[in-house]
Image: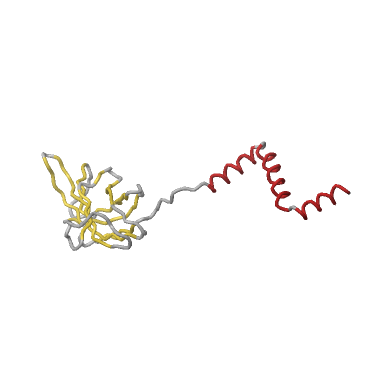
Amino acid sequence: METWTHALDEFAHNPIEVVSAVVVIGGAILSMLKAGRLFWSNLWARLRSKPIILSETFRIVQNIQQSFWHLGGANGERLIQVSFRGYITNISGDTNRVLRAEILKPLTYADMVLISNNNDGRRPQILNPNESADLSATFFIKSLQIKKGEPLNISLIFVDQYANRHKISCVFNSM
């Protein structure tokens, strides 16, 4: 009984030191157990500072009337030219750029990605915060079977400088 009264008296006079001692002793006991080690490692991981990398930097909208596909060829090889036209808006607070564009199936990288204002591509290829501009990308796809006059439905992926992949489902009409 006297031990409890002494402990309560000690806590009343020095509460911070008593709580600190309990936390240290409890932490030492918990760290000997697997669950305790996981608790402390998870706590440390959350407290560590990490740089914030944006996951969504821009929005893209297709201009379906100006986007098209066209059958062609070079050196006896059948190619399909896919021309994307749309609009891009930087929704982050930082400057951003589009590094590349690709089609997943069949894997094809854009031969040209251009950010422009009123079809003038001499502007810097950087989007300032909250800026909108025209976006175009041109692909030459091999080995894709499609009949003339049919619409082409594919997904395009635009990659920014943070390696975020912005996917957009597109419809291309035959030219």
Q: Is residue 30 left or right of residue 58?
A: right
Question: Residue 62's spot in the image, x, y percent?
Answer: 27, 59
Res 118 → quadrant: bottom left
- Residue drawn 52% across the image and 46% down it: 48
Res 67 → quadrant: bottom left
Q: Name the colour scheme.
A: secondary structure
Viewer-side residue, 172 vs 62: 62
Question: Residue 140's spot in the image, x, y percent?
Answer: 19, 46
Q: How many marks?
A: 0
- Residue drawn 64% across the image and 37% down it: 34
**150 lies above or below 140:** below
Q: Is residue 36 left or right of residue 169?
A: right
Q: Is residue 26 left or right of residue 143?
A: right
Question: Residue 131's spot in the image, x, y percent?
Answer: 29, 62
Q: Is residue 171 left or right of residue 14?
A: left
Question: Residue 138's spot in the image, x, y percent?
Answer: 20, 51
**77 lies above or below 112:** above
